[in-house]
Image (cartoon, helix red, strand yellow):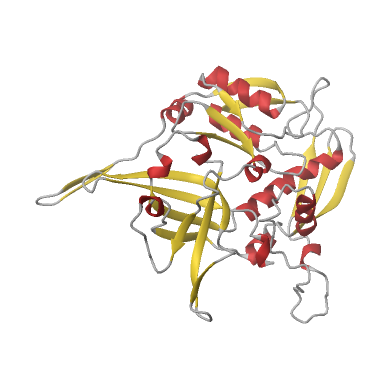
Amino acid sequence: SNARNSNNISIISFHLIEDIKFYSDLTRFSKAYTGTGEQIIASIVKDKLGRELVIESESRSTQSVFRYIVPYQTPLNAIKTVLSKMTTESGMPFFFYSSIIDNKFYLTDLETILKTESFNVNRPFVYDQSNTVRDDLESQIVNIAAIKSTLSENTHEIAQNGAIGSNYESVNATTGQNFGPYHIDMQEHFELLKDLQILPKEQNFVAIDKEFVADPAGIDRSPITSYNSKITTKIITQPYKDAYGFNQEAFPGQEKLSALRQSIFNHLLKNMYTINMPGLLFTVKNIKSCVGHQVAMDIKRNDTDFGAVTIDEKRSGHFVILSKRHNFNIPSETHNISLGLSKLANRSSIA
């Protein structure tokens, strides 16, 4: 904390930490767990944190039963490590979070998040550059006062991180066998997600231009997805006979899911926004308005060609809530909310 003083004003600034995070940071342990990712996380939550785990995921993690020996970690860091191994069959990551509305922990996955309807689907939050706000309460509570783009789409950075094209390979140190190299084309993978309807049909456009030629001279006509901007090499071991090791999978083709998971993360975080708005809708005990769920948002723009206000399709749509902060101004008697938002795909109409 810190304090600032003047002749007639005294300000004290301090930071709060959630009680369970404080307790977790003080509690380090070593222990072996065997089971699926969901089972191991549930055991850590029960044994070390004394809380209930609610599994919201409609999909099970695709990884088989494995053993993880916690190397003197805090409970939350151990859970974070287990999460790094877990994916759905399509490579979607899992998320673990808590909520201010209860003392439970929640486990979900991006596939389930995208399939679950936004709690405000019939009344999207609205940002209007002209700041036209009606007097009625219903309009005011969905009006976004400010919006800021915290991370803008950076094709160069995404490509360097292997989120457009990459190679995966592994070597089994126990048997000497190798798998790969296996090329991952993210444009093809997103097309698969469309076909499986994991990306909803109204918002499934991912801006990867496969016709783009990276070579300025035009001599190399290879599409951008054919480049291996990143090569992931994994060393596999088989330490146990009754379960798979932490870095071991049931079959070689399953290993690439960890690389897919990271690429999907890179696309999810490429367009992040922070919005500020009235907090009334977030005062009710509705788990769907918490982190790990979606909200609908429309950003309006002035169409100078026609003198009308239209929806900015690229910046509008359904967004995943990544962070949420309540702001209480006691002298002004106001309660505002700050949301960190992101989305994996754009609305299909902008394609």
Rendering quarter of residue 159 = bottom right
Q: Is residue 317 left or right of residue 163?
A: left
Q: Quadrant of the N terminus?
A: top left
Residue situated furthest front in the rendering: 136
Residue 47, image x, y percentages: 56, 17
Q: Position of residue 259 (x, y in %)?
A: 73, 47
Q: From what the image shows, is residue 287 above or below residue 195? A: above
Residue at the outermost left position: 7
Residue 316: image quadrant is bottom right
289 or 219, which is in the foreground?
A: 289
Q: Tell me what residue is drawn at x 64 percent, y 53 percent.
A: 344
Q: Is residue 274 above or below residue 287?
A: below
Q: Where 74 sits versus 306, above or below?
A: above
Residue 310's x, y, as percent? 53, 69
| Residue 247 x/y as whole percent | 75, 35
Please name the residue shown 87% across and 48% down the image.
180
Counting every numbered tag in the picture gives 0
Image-based side of 335 in relation to 207, left or right = left
Quarter holding the C terminus is bottom right
